[in-house]
Amino acid sequence: MSVSDAAEAERLLSAHAVRAAADDMLRLAQDWQLADWQVDLSRLDAAADLTADTVRLNYPDLNVPFHARWRHFTANGRNLWTELETPTDPDDLGRAAFDLVIPSVLLDAGAGMAWRYHDAATGAALGRSEGLGVASFRLFQSGALSSDPGDPLQADALDRVDAALIAEAFQVTDDNPLAGLEGRAALLRRLGTVVGRPGELFDVMKARAIRGQLSAPVILEVLLDRLGAIWPGRLSRAGRPLGDCWTHPLPGDHDRLVPLHKLSQWMSYSLIEPLEASGIQILNVDGLTGLAEYRNGGLFVDTGVLVLRDPAEAGRPQVVDSPLVVGWRSLTVALLDKLAPMVRERLGVSAKDFPLARVLEGGSWAAGRRIAREKRADGGPPITVVSDGTVF
């Protein structure tokens, strides 16, 4: 192992590397050097208008929370987390919150258009991320992830998770299919093998705080370091798994590595609230990036900011490691950085009061879903991506 390889692995496992690679991808697109995509930045105004309008529609008072898994632990207006009998000790509460959120985020890869979860306690019928959120919450609440029936609100028995358990908890049938079922179960088993109890990462991050303060990119760095081995079949450098990082061809005859870290960054956003509840101040939230997923990416395709060089590709299923998908996701990150200040200007808010995490929630993710419903009967993304349950 060379020092340079180790340093390169360290660099790639960071939010800074995601942003730098995205900026490079956008420059290539603007220079017409990408085989799959061209970019029309004049259409960003339309994307910003739609996003700002969506923020006002969803949050008229502009009191927008962060884009986090916590938004999906609600059903029919009920906050399910507050209905639990949670620990009173702040550290125990933080560990329990990590035990809920980390597996839940990993279970959130795209559900497919047909799947629904029917929550008996609230009467809600939910699909997509909202349904996956409530289903994973109920799985955690049931104690199925705990080794101790007397302490159900912990996830220290992830080794027992299999496809049958997930299928039962998520109400999967032939008429209610869930994409990537085995992939989700295997991911949780690997999480248990590699990490043990996810709540232990609360203590790791708390120990990284300096005088009660923790930088948000450090949350991501801990996750990428500790969770790297759970991702199946991924690239590695200097013996370190690189997670959501893929090759993409450069003009010429060689490839480069493009880090994205979508699920890990959403997990990072989702861990801010329990860390803050324990008394740790989170700094530099905008040090994390926008999320390279199909709602944000779909917003830019559907508003004409991103245009396929070959329109016929939109009708063909794309695998996640294809140059088309890797380029789409990376361009999405760069374009979200350009979109955010335009949205703030339209809303009359500052970057300090309205960081990227609020733009995403208010926001670009919801606007991407909104325009998808307007353009396609099933509300699906403009590009069909073949999911194995571990990327989106």
Image (cartoon, rainbow, N blue to C red):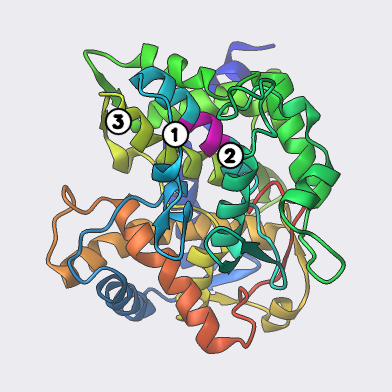
- Name the residue type under label 1: Glu
- Residue denoted by label 3: 277
> Of the residues under marks 1 and 3, which one precedes in the sequence?
1
Residue 254 shows in the view: yes
Q: Which residues are magenta?
A: 97-102
Element under disc 2: helix
Expressed as whole percent of the image width and height from the top left, the position of residue 94 reads 41, 25
Instruction: Between label 2 and label 1, give the one nearer the viewer.
Output: 1
Query: Quick one: quadrant of the N terminus?
Result: top right
Element under disc 3: helix
Element under disc 1: loop
> Distance between the Cα atoms at labels 2 and 1?
10 Å
- Front position in the image: 57 or 352: 57
Whether the magenta-drawn stretch holds residue 36 is answered as no
Q: How many residues crowd mark 3 within 10 Å: few (<14), some (14–19), many (20+)?
A: few
Q: Which mark is residue 141?
A: 2
Expressed as whole percent of the image width and height from the top left, the position of residue 64 reads 26, 58
- Residue denoted by label 1: 85
As displayed, is residue 294 above or below residue 39?
above
- Name the residue type under label 3: Ala
- Front position in the image: 315 or 43: 315
- Front position in the image: 245 or 67: 67
